[in-house]
Amino acid sequence: MIDLHTHLLPGLDDGAPDLASALEMARFAAACGTTHLMCTPHLHLGRYDNCAAGIAATLARFTDALADAGIALQVSAAAEVRFDSELMPLALAGKLPCLGYWQGRQLLLLELPHSHVPAGTIQLARWLMEHGLQPMIAHPERNKGLMSRPEQLRPLLQLGCPLQVTAGSLTGRFGERAQALAERLLLEGQITVLASDAHNLTVRPPNLLPGLTAAIQLVGEPAARRLVEDNPWRITETHFSQSAA
């Protein structure tokens, strides 16, 4: 399985605080059947001011540590980019780390605020697409505004924005309302990727298996596995092919 959204890179955000914790999470992910993992630290202007160079340097140290520890997990990195109109200069400068490619555009993991869908979301998504970046909406099922009014997703879906749903949402880890919206999106065929959004080993572990099992019960194994194998590989293949080379 390929986990496309995680917070394992040590010390960059509210995920793994140090290298030892990051290695424990990586070992656990591998034991749960994850073979490839994208590290996506927050890029949240004014809070987590991560940049491509800093993420790449931390990834290099983490990759070396994984090899030294004998952990069989292939890793690469992008970022979870928080909605902000100030992203435009970074996009124009090519400084937004991307997950890979989707339908001919670089794919950007875009996080909305947890409370609502901000004014200007559609305009920003359209602008990004006009400049070669395809937003993938991170964990929409956990957005309180979307829980109340799921129809707000429709314009983003009409633009072709793929959705990344948190695997734990399908098991109730984030509450009944998030679970209900995740199940609805799954049954409607609107989910492109299930990912762990792992932050730690306790509350938010890097384990896709329970979510995969829940998805299989709802839509069957082939459709569920596409969300943790086929689609994530289509997106991230360039990352892992380069690292293998």
Image: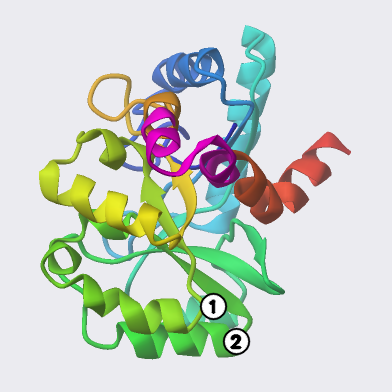
> Where does residue 64 sit, x and y in percent of width and height?
67, 23
Identity, as a three-letter code, of the amino acid under mark 1: Ala
Contact, mark 2 vs mark 1 (Cβ under 8 Å)? yes
Q: Residue at x 74, y 49 (%)?
A: 237
Vertical placement of residue 237 versus 245, above or below: below
Which region of the structure is painted magenta?
Answer: 213-228
In the rendered structure, the answer to whether residue 106 lies left or right of residue 8 reads right
Secondary structure beneath disc 1? Answer: helix
Q: Position of residue 183 (x, y in %)?
A: 29, 49
Is disc 2 placed on a helix, strand or loop?
loop
Asked if the magenta segment contains residue 172, the reply would be: no
Q: Tell me if residue 43 can be seen.
A: no
- Tell me which residue sits at (22%, 86%) in the image: 119
Is residue 214 located in the magenta-colored stretch of the structure?
A: yes
Give percent across and percent down for residue 178. Answer: 19, 49
Total marks drawn? 2
Name the residue tied to disc 2.
131
Query: In the rendered view, would you say 235 is above or below 227?
Result: below
Residue ID for mark 1: 91
Q: Amino acid at mark 2?
A: His
